[in-house]
Image (cartoon, coloured by chain):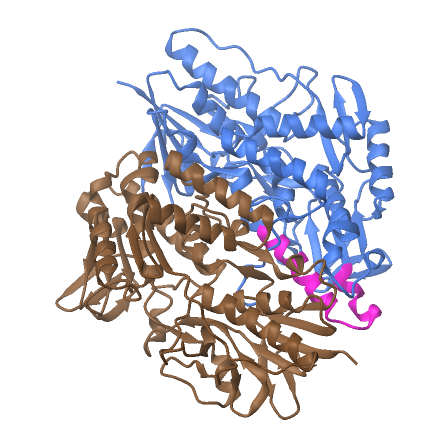
Chain colours: A brown, B blue
Amino acid sequence: MSKNVVIVGGGFAGISAAQKLASSDVNITIIDKTNHHLFQPLLYQVATAALSPGDIAMPIRAIFRRQKNVEVVLGEVTNIDKEQQSVQLKNGHSYPFDYLILAPGAQYNYFGHDEWEKHAPGLKSISDALDIRERILLSLEQAEQIADPKERQPYLTYVVIGGGPTGVEMAGSIAEIAKRSMMRDFRNIKPDETKIYLVEAADGILNAFEEPLSKKGQKTLEDMGVEVLLNTPVKDIRKNGVQIEGRFIETPNIVWGAGVVASPLIKRLEVETDRIGRAVVNPDLSIGDHSNIFVAGDAAHAKDKDGNPLPGLAPVALQQGKYLGELIKNELKGRSRKDFEYVDKGTMATIGRAKAVADVRGFKFSGFFAWILWGLIHIFFLIGFRNRFRVFAEWIWHYMTFKRGVRLIAKKDEES
Amino acid sequence: MSKNVVIVGGGFAGISAAQKLASSDVNITIIDKTNHHLFQPLLYQVATAALSPGDIAMPIRAIFRRQKNVEVVLGEVTNIDKEQQSVQLKNGHSYPFDYLILAPGAQYNYFGHDEWEKHAPGLKSISDALDIRERILLSLEQAEQIADPKERQPYLTYVVIGGGPTGVEMAGSIAEIAKRSMMRDFRNIKPDETKIYLVEAADGILNAFEEPLSKKGQKTLEDMGVEVLLNTPVKDIRKNGVQIEGRFIETPNIVWGAGVVASPLIKRLEVETDRIGRAVVNPDLSIGDHSNIFVAGDAAHAKDKDGNPLPGLAPVALQQGKYLGELIKNELKGRSRKDFEYVDKGTMATIGRAKAVADVRGFKFSGFFAWILWGLIHIFFLIGFRNRFRVFAEWIWHYMTFKRGVRLIAKKDEES
């Protein structure tokens, strides 16, 4: 009888594992809380109205339309029975497995201040991105109607918390919107009234990069008009602003991008976890003495060959998913397992139009070429040809025109 | 001093009036509850996941980027002072006018049963369309997980209420999705399990058309698998279905498209209104003895040269807006007014892929040619070149592939 492979999470790890098993005699079930695979690296482009949700997300069903051994289930996993080998969903259904791949991803961590979340949304899902987009657009509309420049200042102020790639990309995008493209549509607001702060607790931004690129990234942001506040932990976040040491920045526009934790589902596994809740995995990504239960992607704490933990990046998740698909395929043929080995193909972050930093196998560069590379590689990763083509066209279009296409406020309750 | 022209509503009437005044020495203020002009005739395509909201909507600010005499205000009008000549917004701001054009549009009418609205959303705004889209997608996901065909039947049942163009387009689109394109992604549901009902209280659908086309439209829908229930008033709508004479149709998928009423703003005018709340206007679209206050579009009850009231259609609104822009422009130059005269360029309704009915100046036709004409004319009306090009490309793409691009469920609370 065919073995059951259950995959929890339709991100890079889950999707690539299932694709590797296309020609194997297994029954695959992919369970996800949403109905779509999301290309998270471009989510900030949805938040800043450059792309539509449909450009960076694809229904998981559509990805596996032709792969007949895959069943897709929309649902939330509430429990994992390691001994009985089954996962339970919130709706009561349960799915038995011979192999289980857990790739539920990560979520933002508010360091014990969950009440901050509603004032400073993170950027993990499409609804987060649309929420942030609407806040920014509504804030501009409000500023436009206030005659007194001092009174409207808060509505033209933006605070991005966290100097990782997402925070840097958000701050850079907001700077472009605020300083140039969108502002041309407003009659009363002047571009130089906009204030953008990137708040980081550590002593530098883009810490995944080595010194020259990290500094270069900061310089680029500052040239674009972003004020980078280093060594600045956030003390409080309220509806109307952010409290930092000795100062309260008044604004309704706060975006959270500081620190992630693994999905709470990992706790249900009852295995060793690291500081940010990721499951510490064996060299073959299995957990404890359960050789048929794996954790991959942002929720896994795996190590590189020097013993350093791997970062939560798309390429890591993608390689882990492929590795697990291959492992199961081989094991069914009676072959033995090899350990997972991450191949670092480089790290990149985009900062703005024609501005990026890249570190490819020790070769560091920045500026226009790094940006083009970033674009090509990210668009190449997009799953589904049609999306890929559209996003590329949109991207070039924005480069040429500075226009932001998708500035719609869909909410019914615009006014309070 | 330049005269103030205040326009309430950024639909076809409001936008076209402002555009006609581009070269006049007037200060134009456009006030709308949303930040975008919406191409309503294609809204059903967003509801059925063929187009993204960004494809059929454009920020009003962006439309008037280059027209410097226009100011755009996001806000809700709460009062109109005809004597003092000013409009008041919910946020307390007020705008004085020399000329006022009221084009606030229409909304769905639940015939005194406002409690039906939450179970049977209408299709007037982007958030309505996204709401309906998510209901349909979630319902399919639920059906996929229910093993018993009898138990899953309600989730594969759709009821569209109202046999006007919107209802017919929705029913036709759902039939296409359900019978063909989307179903290929599901493993358990069979296309012939889907049941689609179009419920109409009158004795025919598409009553704006004459007999042969109306009958032809019904035949086309039936061939596509839609069950058309004529002479069937709705008795009750509940969360889990629709009660009609002698029968309860169980389903969570209910779309309302039966009967509209003018925006409640018209009541504030204190003028004569018709049965559906539209302001009865003078031959120059002004109201009562206020020659500087006009009502246009779906909220106006104007008459054609035979004395019949004009229908609430995009071409009527567009021609009225242009007429009013022209009227004000001429009046400022000291020229006298002419009456508004509607030029009927034809009526069309699309039913499905390569299926439509059209009546152009008495020349009636249906099928593929009517459909192409419908597409060309509707896309031609789209304001903003880039959207137009994209929508056309999407449309052709769907024709060739039967694929639905934008099937995303963005809600956070997928399960209850």
Residue A126 in the image, given as x and y percentages of width and height = 49, 58
The residue drawn where x is 64% and y is 40% is B260
**Foreground residue, A14 or A35?**
A14
Residue A352 coordinates in the image, percent (x, y) = 32, 47
Residue A110 placement: quadrant: bottom left
Give the residues in magenta: B130-156
Which quarter of the figure has residue A211? bottom left
Residue A152: horizontal and vertical position, in percent? 23, 47
Residue depicted at x 27% and y 68%: A237
Q: Is residue B203 above or below residue B13?
A: below
Residue A414 in the figure: left or right of residue B310: left
The quadrant in which residue B205 appears is top right
Is residue B348 shown left or right of residue B315?
right
Taking the magenta stretch, the answer to whether it contains residue B153 is yes
Q: Nearer the viewer, residue A255 or A337?
A: A337
Q: Looking at the picture, does residue A12 appear above or below residue B124?
A: below
Tell me, yes or no, if residue B83 can be seen here.
yes
Q: Quadrant of the C terminus of chain B?
A: bottom right
Is B102 displayed left or right of B68 in the figure? right
Question: Where residue A175 appears, x then y in whole percent?
Answer: 28, 47
Q: Is residue B80 magenta?
A: no
Q: Is residue B328 left or right of residue A148?
A: right
